[in-house]
Image (cartoon, coloured by chain):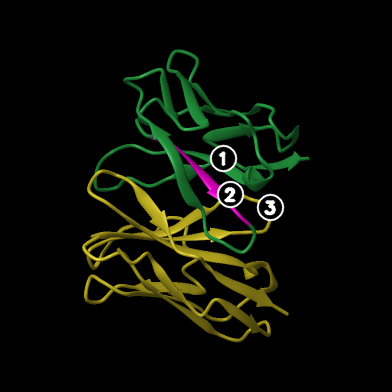
Amino acid sequence: QQQVKQSPQSLIVQKGGISIINCAYENTAFDYFPWYQQFPGKGPALLIAIRPDVSEKKEGRFTISFNKSAKQFSLHIMDSQPGDSATYFCAASFTGTASKLTFGTGTRLQVTL
Amino acid sequence: EAGVAQSPRYKIIEKRQSVAFWCNPISGHATLYWYQQILGQGPKLLIQFQNNGVVDDSQLPKDRFSAERLKGVDSTLKIQPAKLEDSAVYLCASRTVANTIYFGEGSWLTVV
């Protein structure tokens, strides 16, 4: 059972444009929603995360928008740069000792010049 | 602060052989995870430890995979015998008390 659905699978954006990646979850017990960035040959690195008590969180050029009623959240990358080219994974978890991340399928972002 | 350390980084073995991966989590992190990431997919949880106890191993193929964290710090993941479909990146991660999970660089396994 896939509990976190991510789209699109791949995305090409011009330098300076806005990259938008969407995720939807099923389990209403989830209360922590991080985004990870993964470069080839590297492990996933935490980019930004949000909890459902806020609808938006911004860190630099990266913004998470969260819609609790729709059970959806998205990552917006403003002023996309070639260095942002990577695979992005959304994830979800719940707090507690048994907390573990359930990942989306990933979005491969390419930012062109 | 040092990150999650994993070794070896790369391993090529023949099917039916065995392999072991080692992980040293961030100091003080009680929770440790092993994830399997097949090329083009998101990481999938294999096993979760809290100190030296297993919290969740429901997705671990126990007929061939085993993992331990004897002293509540380092952990090893073993595969015996390996199958072609075990070719993947094995990611170790550890968690802060604030629920932030950090990953290592991964151990890349190719089974031929």
In the image, the chain rendered in green is A
Foreground pick, B59 / A95: A95
Where residue B79 sits in the image (x, y, percent)?
52, 77
Q: Which residues are magenta?
A: A33-39
**Residues at marks 1 and 3, common chain?**
no
Relative horizontal placement of residue A96, taking residue B111 as reference (left or right): left
In the picture as drawn, the residue positioned furthest to the top comes out as A69
**Quarter occupied by the C terminus of chain A:** top right
What amino acid is labelled 2 in the image? Gly
The answer to whether mark 2 and mark 1 are in CB contact below 8 A is: yes
Q: What is the number of the mark on residue B21?
A: none
Instruction: Give the residue at mark 2.
Output: B42
At mark 1, the secondary structure is loop
In the image, the chain rendered in yellow is B
For the point 67% across and 67% down, the residue is B85
For the point 50% across and 72% down, the residue is B63
Foreground pick, B57 / A17: A17
In the rendered view, tell whether residue A55 sits above or below residue A99: above
Mark 3 and mark 2: span between their CA atoms? 7 Å
The answer to whether mark 3 and mark 2 are in CB contact below 8 A is: no
What amino acid is labelled 3 in the image? Gly
**Is the magenta region chiefly helix, strand or loop?**
strand
In the rendered view, tell whether residue A34 sits above or below residue B30: above
Instruction: Give the residue at mark 1.
Output: A104
Q: Chain of mark 2?
A: B
For the point 52% across and 59% down, the residue is A43
What amino acid is labelled 1 in the image? Gly
Instruction: Give the residue at mark 3.
Output: B40
